[in-house]
Image (cartoon, rainbow, N blue to C red):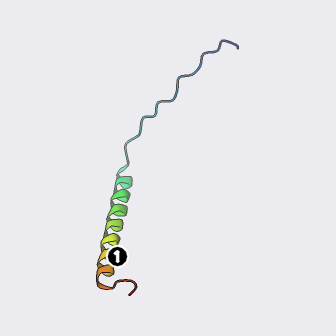
Amino acid sequence: MTGSPVPPPPQNVPEPLLPVEKKLIGWSLGIGVTLLVLLAVLNHFLPAGG
């Protein structure tokens, strides 16, 4: 062992989201919920199988 100091562990500080990233997350959630509701409505009126 050479006695060299051990560097401290890196600080995992999350950086804030950019406005475009917030918009992308919002659009993704909106599209996902909309498609889920559409699928539920279609399944109600047109059930798969007999």
On screen, residue 3 above or below 10 = above
Secondary element at image label 1: helix
Q: Residue furthest front?
A: 50
Total labels: the figure holds 1
Q: Label 1: how many residues lie within 10 Å, few (<14), some (14-19) or many (20+)?
A: few
Q: Position of residue 34 (x, y in %)?
A: 31, 70
Quadrant in the picture for the N terminus: top right
Residue drawn at (47%, 30%) of the image: 11
Quadrant in the picture for the C terminus: bottom left
Q: Nearer the viewer, residue 5 or 32?
A: 32
Q: Residue furthest top?
A: 3
Q: Nearer the viewer, residue 3 or 19?
A: 3
Is 8 left, or right, of 29 in this rendering?
A: right
Q: Which residue carries the number 1 mark?
A: 39
Q: Position of residue 5 (x, y in %)?
A: 60, 16
Q: Residue furthest bottom?
A: 50
On screen, residue 22 above or below 30 = above
On screen, residue 38 above or below 10 = below
Residue drawn at (37%, 55%) of the image: 20
Q: Position of residue 31 (x, y in %)?
A: 35, 67
Residue drawn at (34%, 52%) of the image: 19
Q: Quadrant of residue 16?
A: top left
Name the residue type under label 1: Leu
Residue drawn at (37%, 49%) of the image: 18
